[in-house]
């Protein structure tokens, strides 16, 4: 009798672990769903409902398992370890690589729920020879619920902040496999079967551990599929995720998943960014200010003018300038412009820089990311351009990248109107860059600035621009023609919402 | 269980240790403050008597404004301040990565009638010029950068306080109807030709039809006008709490409507964007300027106990607690004194004074949270949580250019119920840990992670934060909007209690007015009035 009352504490601990990991998988799925799909209330509600329902299915199905209970139990644990353990990485991959996230999510939740549903009835049946039913159900279910509590406390307080979702799911996969392994010691079975089961457990543990170790590269591979080319370099700075991809033909830079340039056609962009401005200046610039443009490609173009004495390049993100000083493919692209002795790099906010800087410049090249949020948006405001004007004076020239006049027409003309309101004379221009489409810039200068007629470089230095091509840059066809636009100010930043809605329209 | 615990331990041990929250209840030295109420030992040692031209009691906006005005006419002042810091309810802190407010945190661009504040802003270089229509233009970097506000409602953030996309049709209609009413009110003019609601409030119409609104609570007014949706009531109550620390049921409808209908001016600059002037240290920036400009000598931890007439002017008696263990009594003789303190305190200092008004005062809790959190490009200056207990928080680092992980968030909570004294008592008894938990819990719906991100959380309890304009508050003065300024011979009063609306423009105007009254008494030829 005393024998029948004894259940080893390790076995009971296993019950808790099982319960904890079941809930953890559910929480992982719910959290990922609300990250990706938004509306956390709905997502959690769907995931929890589906999970409980699947558990019901699992419980029901358990009645069809009649023989070799321990073997089945171990197999179910291992299946759970694999599906649950890899659930976060799988879902992440699905999100980045294809549109099938939602379907995969529900499938994963169904499978996990069903497996968890089989687990407990099976365990009860495995133990029923040791304890009478009343005692057994009470203990197992009590511990199951303890595990649930445990999981729901552990998950938000410790696991997500410390491990992140991916490693959490894999860690619990490992725990599941360890439970399977432990059960082969705790419950009676034939000797040779035991060893086979233990071996599968070991393989699963190894696979998941490898997964955890490979996690960094695993995440990268997801991104690579997403970005469409192998990753040459990737890092997460304070401000953004920076990825450089390289296929045999092209090198591309992505910031937070948005394409910044492609080596195929960046020459079009950067030639138009720099040379018409120098032509409009009417003299070779001696001192040049580059704001943004930490990739050094604008600097590369500026350095084509032999009389340039000094370039000050201001880019917020030290990681970007570091990559373009150090990574070989990047240095090849910018022809090592960031190592040129005439270039001084300052990693600070451009607005802050303008507020404190007292130097003056012949030419300012303003090349920021598009005004898609309020932090960059500040760099497209009246106050910003007023400060810029103080730095170039009435004789200097500035050129500003101003998003696409085709996809974001009102945004483009808002930027032009704002620059004009700061006291500049403006000449808007545009160019077709195949990877981006139609792209626009605003040339800004003093009263006397006229449309440039000839480039100040020897013929055939450039790949795209030529003297005859110049006038065409300044002609705006009707579908991108000037339209009424208001001034963008720091305290309203209307440009951000105009820009976001214009691009959203194209993505519909 | 053990293995799970073990895993937890492993995870915890292998990662950087969790920060523990530090902080304290700062400011308002209650014991010192109560010295005046409870009386002090008259046998304390006495410091040698001193002389000053004018003594100003209190270094809040009113006191600093008075010093600023006096200095412009060449009259020197000595400021006596109970607290170790300046600014009163516009005080600020400078510890941490960015200066931050302990009270007043913004100034809407003043109306053309608020002449003293406009002069101050011009002096600061914040007001840069005037447009063709004669309206003030500002340095745009000082206006609150977009986005100004966001609202956490039904589980996510919305731009602005009017979260259009989650409101029902009825709520939207009502909001539109309310705004329409307010725009009618802001254009309304009384029988005396004055605008119905103006800033400073003394410029408002005395027309009885408009003043009758002061007999109602805002709650009653909303009911009378058929405004019933819970969103609109929340929206209006948010405003009455923010400006007066009062719930709808305990605030004059005139005062509440004044909030919505007194600011008319729009220029090209503020047409579509924020019209708030904000500084990291809040309105403390303005106080600091006036104090520096005036060159007035300032003595902190001086509780003024009394003021009496002498043959040559006044004598001010103060408890000097600079050395906490060994307080001394100090007597300063001056030609005049300005009491820039609340009415109930002025009444204790100047016994027998005429026309002082003791206003009921709302208690407030302010907390500054020093946080490190991931950078995010679209954070607003003011973050409000729908139906939270407090008013949300402002980000002191908002006007900085560039993104930073570190900033200071200033959390505000007004206790708007009718039982002010009881609340005051409860708040005073609360320990730091309890107050800190109150703050974090109130923000948890939007920021469950905030506790982890905060390294320091300091709290300030304002027992008498600001006068509460209850129904009938305009009747506290014999003539509406015309409070006593000279309350005794050579003694003037300057404080937001005078008109009962705690706004920078009011305090600044009261301080200037009191200074000009003192100048007249001293026979100093004041140039034109600044008011
Ligand atoms: C939390 C909070 C937020 C606010 N936000 C805003 C805002 O955003 N915008 C706005 O315009 N207004 C705001 N206000 C209103 C603010 O109160 C006024 O703008 C203004 O600061 C009032 O100044 P005051 O000088 O009239 O009074 P107080 O600030 O009350 O100044 C009185 C001074 O006298 C001192 N004192 C008192 N007794 C004695 C004594 N016996 N001896 C010596 N010194 C004494 C006090 O310590 C204090 O420094 C806010 C107020 C609070 C509390």
Image: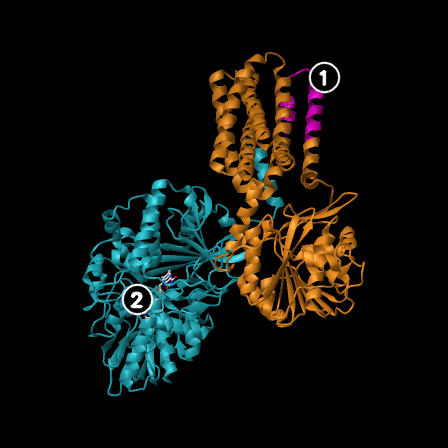
Spot occupied by residue A466 in the image (x, y as percentages of width and height): 75, 58
Q: Is residue B127 left or right of residue A209?
A: left
Q: Tell me the chain of label 2.
A: B
Label 2 residue near ligand 1, CB within 8 Å: no
Q: Is residue A58 above or below residue A441?
A: above
Do the CB atoms of the residues marked 2 and 1 lie less than 8 Å apart? no
Q: Is B155 or B449 nearer to us in this picture?
A: B155
Q: Which residues are magenta?
A: A178-205
Residue shown at 31% from the left, 86% from the top: B524
Find residue B239 and report its horizontal and vertical position in percent.
Answer: 34, 54
Residue B1: percent from left, percent from top: 55, 32
Residue A192 is labelled as: 1
Give residue A409's mark: none
Name the residue rendered at 39%, 42% in the picture.
Answer: B167
Estimate the spatial distance between the alpha carbons at disc 2 and disc 1, rounded to whole Å: 85 Å
The residue under label 2 is B34
Query: What is the chain identity of the residue bearing mark 1?
Result: A
Q: Please, is residue A106 above or below residue B522 in the view? A: above
Q: Residue at x 59, y 11 (%)?
A: A66
Residue B359 is a magenta residue: no
Residue A284 higher or lower than B248, as above or below: below
**Most common SS among magenta residues:** helix
| Chain letter for the part of the structure drawn in orange | A
Q: How is the image coloured?
A: by chain
Chain identifier, colour cyan: B
């Amino acid at each position: 009798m005393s024998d029948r009352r004894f259940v080893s504490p390790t076995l009971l601990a296993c019950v808790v672990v099982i319960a904890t990991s079941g809930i953890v998988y559910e929480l992982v799925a719910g959290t990922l769903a609300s990250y990706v799909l938004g509306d956390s209330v709905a997502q959690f509600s769907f995931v929890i409902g589906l999970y409980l329902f699947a558990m019901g299915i699992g419980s029901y199905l358990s009645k069809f398992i009649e023989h070799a209970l321990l073997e089945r139990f171990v197999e179910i644990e291992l299946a759970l370890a694999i599906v649950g353990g890899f659930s976060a990485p799988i879902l992440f991959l699905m999100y980045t690589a294809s549109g099938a996230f939602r379907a995969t999510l529900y499938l994963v939740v169904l499978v996990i729920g069903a497996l968890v549903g089989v687990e407990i009835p099976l365990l009860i049946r495995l133990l029923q020879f040791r304890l009478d039913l009343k005692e057994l159900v009470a203990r197992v279910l009590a511990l199951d619920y303890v595990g649930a509590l445990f999981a729901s406390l552990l998950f938000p307080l410790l696991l997500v902040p410390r491990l992140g979702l991916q490693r959490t799911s894999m860690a619990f996969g490992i725990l599941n496999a360890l439970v399977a392994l432990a059960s082969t010691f705790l419950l009676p079975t034939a000797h040779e079967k035991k060893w086979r089961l233990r071996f599968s457990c070991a393989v699963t543990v190894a696979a998941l551990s490898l997964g955890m170790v490979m996690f960094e590269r695993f995440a990268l591979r997801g991104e690579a599929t997403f970005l469409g080319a192998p990753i040459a370099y990737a890092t997460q700075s304070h401000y953004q995720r920076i990825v450089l991809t390289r296929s045999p033909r092209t090198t591309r830079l992505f910031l937070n998943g948005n394409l910044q340039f492609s080596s195929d056609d960046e020459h079009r962009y950067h030639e138009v960014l720099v040379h018409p401005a120098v032509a409009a200046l009417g003299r070779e610039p001696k001192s040049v200010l580059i704001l943004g443009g930490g990739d050094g490609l604008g600097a590369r173009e500026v350095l084509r003018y032999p009389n340039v004495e000094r370039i000050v390049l201001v880019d917020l993100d030290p990681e970007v300038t570091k990559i373009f000083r150090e990574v070989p493919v990047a240095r090849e692209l910018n022809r090592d412009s960031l190592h040129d002795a005439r270039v001084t790099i300052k990693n600070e906010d451009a607005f802050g820089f303008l507020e404190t800087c007292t130097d003056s410049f012949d030419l300012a090249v303003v090349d920021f990311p598009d005004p898609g949020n309020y932090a960059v948006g500040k760099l497209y405001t009246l106050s910003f351009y007023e400060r810029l004007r103080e730095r170039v004076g009435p004789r200097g020239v500035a050129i500003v990248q101003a998003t696409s006049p085709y996809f974001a027409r009102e945004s483009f003309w808002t930027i032009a109107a704002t620059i004009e309101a700061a006291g500049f004379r403006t000449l808007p221009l545009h160019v077709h860059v195949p990877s981006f489409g139609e792209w626009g810039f605003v040339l800004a200068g003093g009263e006397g600035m006229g449309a440039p007629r000839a480039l100040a470089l020897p013929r055939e230095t450039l790949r795209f621009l030529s003297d005859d091509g110049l006038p065409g840059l300044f002609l705006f066809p009707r579908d991108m023609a000037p339209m009424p636009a208001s001034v963008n100010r720091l305290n309203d930043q209307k440009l951000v919402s105009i820009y976001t809605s214009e691009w959203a329209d194209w993505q519909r | 269980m053990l293995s799970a615990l073990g895993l937890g331990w492993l995870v915890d041990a292998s990662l950087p240790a969790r920060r523990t929250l530090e902080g304290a209840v700062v400011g308002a030295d209650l014991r010192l403050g109560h010295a005046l109420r409870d009386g002090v030992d008259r046998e304390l040692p006495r410091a040698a008597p001193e002389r000053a031209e004018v003594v100003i009691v209190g270094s809040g906006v009113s006191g600093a404004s008075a010093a600023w005005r006096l200095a412009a006419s060449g009259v020197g002042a000595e400021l006596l301040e109970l607290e170790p810091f300046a600014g009163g309810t516009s005080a600020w802190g400078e510890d941490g990565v960015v200066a931050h407010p302990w009270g007043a945190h913004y100034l809407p661009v003043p109306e053309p009638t608020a002449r003293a504040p406009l002069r101050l802003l011009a002096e600061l270089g914040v007001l840069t010029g005037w447009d063709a229509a004669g309206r003030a233009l500002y340095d745009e970097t000082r206006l609150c950068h977009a986005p100004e506000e966001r609202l956490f409602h039904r589980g996510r953030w919305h731009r602005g306080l009017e979260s259009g996309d989650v409101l029902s049709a009825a709520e939207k209609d009502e909001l539109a109807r309310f705004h329409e009413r307010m725009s009618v009110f802001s254009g309304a003019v009384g029988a005396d030709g004055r605008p119905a609601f103006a800033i400073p409030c003394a410029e408002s119409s005395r027309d009885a039809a408009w003043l009758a609104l002061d007999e109602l609570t805002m709650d009653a007014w909303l009911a009378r006008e058929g405004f019933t949706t819970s969103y609109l009531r929340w929206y209006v109550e948010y405003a009455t709490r923010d400006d007066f620390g009062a719930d709808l049921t305990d605030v004059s409808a005139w005062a509440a409507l004044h909030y919505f209908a007194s600011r008319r001016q729009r220029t090209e600059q503020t047409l579509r964007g924020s019209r708030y002037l904000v500084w990291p240290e809040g309105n403390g920036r303005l106080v600091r300027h006036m104090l520096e400009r005036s060159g007035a000598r300032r003595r902190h931890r001086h509780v003024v106990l009394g003021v009496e007439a002498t043959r040559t002017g006044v004598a001010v008696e103060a408890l000097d607690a600079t050395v906490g263990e060994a307080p001394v009594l100090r007597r300063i003789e001056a030609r005049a004194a300005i009491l820039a303190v609340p009415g109930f305190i002025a009444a204790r200092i100047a016994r027998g004074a005429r026309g002082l008004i003791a206003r009921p005062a709302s208690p407030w809790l302010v907390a500054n949270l020093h946080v490190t959190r991931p950078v995010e490009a679209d954070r607003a200056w003011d973050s409000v949580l729908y139906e939270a207990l407090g008013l949300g928080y402002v980000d002191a680092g908002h006007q900085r250019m560039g993104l930073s992980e570190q900033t200071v968030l200033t959390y505000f909570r007004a206790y708007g119920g009718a039982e002010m004294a009881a609340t005051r008592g409860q708040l005073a008894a609360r320990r730091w840990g309890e107050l800190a938990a109150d703050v974090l819990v109130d923000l948890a719906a939007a920021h469950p992670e905030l506790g982890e991100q905060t390294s320091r959380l300091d709290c300030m309890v304002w027992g008498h934060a600001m006068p509460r304009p209850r129904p009938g508050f305009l009747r506290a003065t014999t003539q509406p909007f015309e409070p006593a300024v000279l309350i005794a011979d050579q003694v003037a009063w300057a404080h937001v209690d005078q008109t009962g609306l705690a706004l920078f423009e009011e305090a600044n105007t009261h301080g200037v007015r009191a200074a000009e009254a003192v100048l007249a008494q001293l026979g100093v030829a004041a140039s034109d009035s600044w008011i």
